[in-house]
Image (spheres, rainbow, N blue to C red):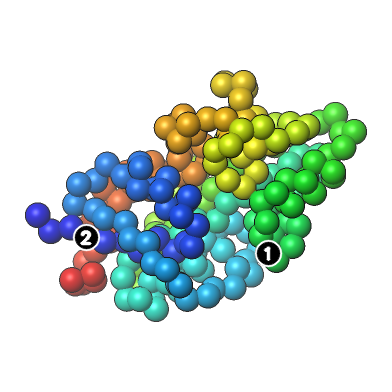
Amino acid sequence: MKTNKILVATQNRNKFREIVKLNTIDKLEFLYKKNLIDIVEDGNNFFENAYKKAYETAKYYRMVSMADDSGLVVDALNGAPGIYSARYAGKEKNDKKNNTKLLRKLKNKLNRKARFKAIIVLARPDGKYWKAEGVCEGYITTEPKGENGFGYDPIFKIDRFNKTMAQLSLEEKNLISHRGKSIRKMLDKIDQNFTEIFKGGINE
């Protein structure tokens, strides 16, 4: 059976693992590539960044590509860190420093409600695209807990489990996470639009 391939536009192996874990389409394979072209994320929102990454990658490598842009939106900080979540504490994108800065910003704040948002875009080299969105509600703890996950997972608590995301297994996280929800929605769209997505000999 022929397998169609989608290049995932990320250098984050944790994100890639989550996508592969959720894939239920037998004739579909997700690819990870080291040293992808460098794309400046200069969009004004999650969608603009995700689309730019997916489309520029698809155009450069001449194959269907998928990218996400996601981040943490904190009510008491007027939506920050938002699209700057990965580099909240600096360009080096250090998870520990990002968490430390966020906890410092929320010190003495009573409202600790927050949500993770993820936008996934699948793009063909000609610019045609499909979009999916996922949201996960929770709140920010006062200290990190857990060893799993990445990013803000150690300080983002889910009421349903009474645990931080970093205390969940990958299977538990994928059930409720913003990325898990958006990936499942995207997989449904891929399944429903398979022929159109891969038409024109792309990936052959």
The one nearer the camera, 138 or 87, is: 87
Based on the displayed image, in which of its 4 quarters is residue 183 positioned? top left
Identify the residue at image location x=65%, y=37%: 154
Taking the image as shown, residue 147 lies to the left or right of residue 99, namely left
Where residue 196 sits in the image (x, y, percent)? 24, 61
In the rendered view, would you say 125 is above or below 147? Answer: below
In the rendered view, would you say 9 is above or below 76? Answer: below
The secondary element bearing badge 2 is classed as strand
Verify CB contact (< 8 Å) between mark 2 and mark 1: no
Task: Say whether disc 2 or disc 1 marks the residue closer to the N-terminus.
Answer: 2
Instruction: Using a 10 Å C-alpha cutoff, classify the residue at mark 1 as few (fewer than 14 neighbours), some (14 to 19) or many (20 or more).
Output: few
Q: Which residue is labeled 2 in the image?
A: 4
Q: Is there any visible trace of residue 156 in the rendered image? A: no
Residue 2's mark? none
Label 2 vs label 1: CA separation? 35 Å
Q: Which residue is labeled 1 in the image?
A: 92
The single residue placed furthest to the left in the displayed view is: 1
Where residue 152 sits in the image (x, y, percent)? 65, 43
Based on the displayed image, in which of its 4 quarters is residue 112 positioned? top right
Q: Amino acid at mark 1?
A: Glu
Taking the image as shown, residue 118 lies to the left or right of residue 152, namely left
Identify the residue at image location x=38%, y=67%: 33
Instruction: Using a 10 Å C-alpha cutoff, classify the residue at mark 2 as few (fewer than 14 neighbours), some (14 to 19) or many (20 or more).
Output: some
Quadrant assignment for the C terminus: bottom left
Identify the residue at image location x=54%, y=38%: 148
